[in-house]
Image: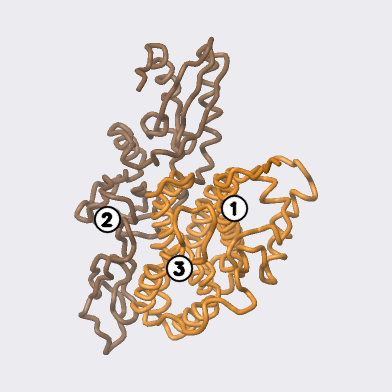
Amino acid sequence: MVTPTALEAELFEVAGAVPDPELPVLTLQELGVLRAVRLGHADAVEVELTPTYTGCPAIEAMSLDIERALHAHGVREVTVRTVLTPAWSTDDISAEGRRKLREFGIAPPRAVRGPGPVPLELGPTRSGRTTGRTPVAAAAGHAVPAGSAAAVVEPTQASAQTPAEAPVAAADPIRCPLCGSAETELLSRFSSTACKALRRCLACREPFDHFKEL
Amino acid sequence: MTRQAPAPTAAHTTTAALALGDDALVLSHRLGEWMGHAPVLEEEVALANIALDLLGQARILLSMAGDEDDLAYLREERAFRNVQLVEQPNGDFAHTIARQLYFSTYQHLLYDRLAAGRSPFAGLAAKAVKEVAYHRDHAEQWALRLGDGTDVAHERMRRACTALWRFTGEMFRPLDGLDLDPAGLEPDWLESVGGILGRAGLALPEGPRTGAWTAGAGREGLHTESFGRMLAEMQHLHRSHPGATW
């Protein structure tokens, strides 16, 4: 374990202040993707960056922006290295980052208790069973064919056979970032980017993005 | 007499990196073919996002085996090591979902196990398993919705699951370079897929899970007819304009 020098800490601040190219309200430090800034020989600096999602195309823009910022700060040689371990998690987003996301209209991710998908729900299907893991009122305005076991709302069991699947705190609702209501519904589990899901507030009726837990 | 055998671990890692990388690359391309054709906009976005995750995995895995672009764009069909399941055409939406269900369930089990190991794949697997959990969930929700849906949806889902069944055995064959035997994933896979299909009002299809003529198939470089056409489209630009950039 090497303690960063004062200069390294200063350069970390400079690189960390670079805005995220996709969500410019957040800095890379708040997003938690900047892992280390190390001073090599002379004024050569090595930066360790981790992608949010494996396929996130923003990582290249981030690297370029970091290089530019450090060059502007007087560093001659910058190498940005992508590291995968330990895997980034939405828990790495700082409290300030979460506040900014909410202010920007994106519901921040909830704390992750373990890897795996968040329990989500679609409407009831023909036989009256829900497709999600959370019971949904089968009578919530959805037509259920007569004679089907509409009353039996049978939550799908979290597949015991899939490993490492401890859902995020299900009791912790995703709140509308606009009005704060806890009554929101899922529209699509993938939104404008892989890291977000599209939801709608049932109180103010506004659609909004939710930064999915990862 | 000196024997210059390549370091076995490195060569085996390349074998596995190509196999897993090609799985991700080819499935990513197939999902990308839905762009502009998906049934609804949200679903198009979902499939594109899943494709992007897979492309990210493919880039890292193929880079472990060589130059990612050369490997993706300049290899002939027989040099690809993906399982035949992922190269199967999209078919109708039910076919795509059945393919996703079969593959993402396998990939989730595989990455979860790899993440706990010490192979060179552990780091990527630990990261990607969290993404694949969302892919698997997406496939599960749709399998339930279609299987437990209208008569037409139910029948299409049943037909798709049956049609792709014979490609599912290949995923569990031994693969050099992994610190696990994929055969060990099979009981969990059968239980997971069987459970989902059961809840969808369907059942695990019957019949062989490998065709006699496909033995070893994709992992040995033997592919099905449509794969050549897919590659032609995927590689055309790079081959026609070598070194082209945006």
Name which quarter of the figure residue A61 lies in: top right
Evaluate whether label 3 is on the same chain as label 1: yes
State the separation of the CA atoms marked 3 and 1: 25 Å
Q: Residues within 10 Å of mark 2 (few under 14, many from 20)?
A: some
Q: Which chain is brown?
A: A
For disc 1, the marked residue is B15
Chain ID at mark 3: B
Q: Decide if residue A135 is on the left or right side of residue B231.
A: left
* Amino acid found under the numbered disc labelled 1: Thr
Residue sitting at 40 percent across and 20 percent down?
A13
**Disc assigned to residue B62:** none
Where does residue A14 sit, x and y in percent of width and height?
44, 19
Name which quarter of the figure residue A20 lies in: top left
Residue that sits furthest to the bottom in the current view: A147
For disc 2, the marked residue is A166
- As helix, strand or loop, the secondary structure at mark 3 comes to helix
Q: Colour of chain B?
A: orange
Q: Nearer the viewer, mark 3 or mark 1?
A: 1
Q: Is residue B127 above or below residue A146?
A: above
For disc 3, the marked residue is B101
